[in-house]
Image (cartoon, rainbow, N blue to C red):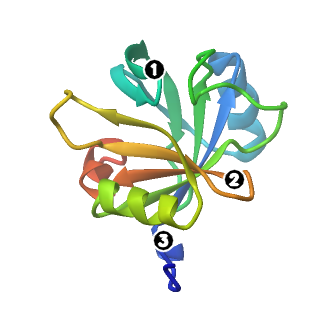
Amino acid sequence: MIDHPILAAADLWHTGIVVDDLEAAKAELGLDLGVNWRDGGAAVRLSTDDGVMTVQTAYALSVEGPHHVELVQSIPGTVWTSLAPGHAHLLGYWVDDVVAISDALTARGAVRLASVAMTDDAPPMCAYLRATTGLHVEIVDRRLRKVLLPGS
């Protein structure tokens, strides 16, 4: 059993919220939270225990930080399925090695939900896990920081 922290509090960089209407959520929460949004999304290869599928993602990431808010368009049947309205979906952490951290978290009891990689033979860029408490955690390769947070 691993008896030391796996993730570092200093690497917590965003809270993700899955929403059913991305544009409406951006309009409402942008005003409520006082943030501006940078849009993103792509066709990604989502790997789960059920296999690999390509899905089109869409998200908005708050420009303001250092802790960012991410709104993710829901995609039924995937890890990006919305929970009850107003509930945070996940906490996102930067990591240096997605596979090693994912393995360490699963060794501690977390359930691996999905991962995203560019190709079948490429290492994952990020992974999604559910802790024993039910909390969803996203671990993101630190090298994506310049892509996701340009200018930071």
Q: Residue at x 63, y 47 (%)?
A: 90
**Residue shown at 65%/27% (left/top)?**
26
Identity, as a three-letter code, of the amino acid under mark 2: Leu
Residue 7 appears anywhere in the view = yes
Whether residue 151 is visible here, answered yes or no, is no
Give the quarter of the figure containing the C terminus: bottom left
Tag 1 secondary structure: loop
- Amino acid type of the residue tagged 1 in the rendering: Thr
Q: Which residue is mark 3?
A: 7
Image quadrant in which you'd find residue 143: bottom left
Image quadrant where residue 84 sits: top right
Q: CA distance from mark 1 to mark 2?
A: 22 Å
Residue underneath mark 1? 57
Indicate whether 42 appears above or below 143: above
**Going from the N terminus, do you reach mark 1 or mark 3 first?**
3
How would you rate the neighbour count of disc 3 (Cα within 10 Å): few for under 14, some for 14-19, many for 20 or more? some
Please, what is the three-letter code of the amino acid marked with disc 3? Leu
Q: Residue at x 19, y 27 (%)?
A: 119
Marks 1 and 2: CB-CB under 8 Å?
no
Closer to the eye: label 1 or 3: 3
1 and 3 marks in contact (CB < 8 Å): no
Q: Reading the chain from its start, which is encountered first: label 1 or label 2?
A: 1
Mark drawn on residue 135: 2
Q: Which mark is residue 76?
A: none
Q: Nearer the viewer, residue 28 or 97?
A: 97
Gap in Å between the C-alphas at discs 1 and 3?
26 Å
Horizontally, residue 97 falls left or right of residue 126, namely left
Q: Earlier in the sequence, mark 3 or mark 2?
A: 3
For label 2, count other residues whose C-alpha is less than 10 Å away and answer few (under 14), some (14-19) or many (20+): few
Residue 27's x, y, as percent? 70, 25
The CA span between labels 3 and 2 is 14 Å
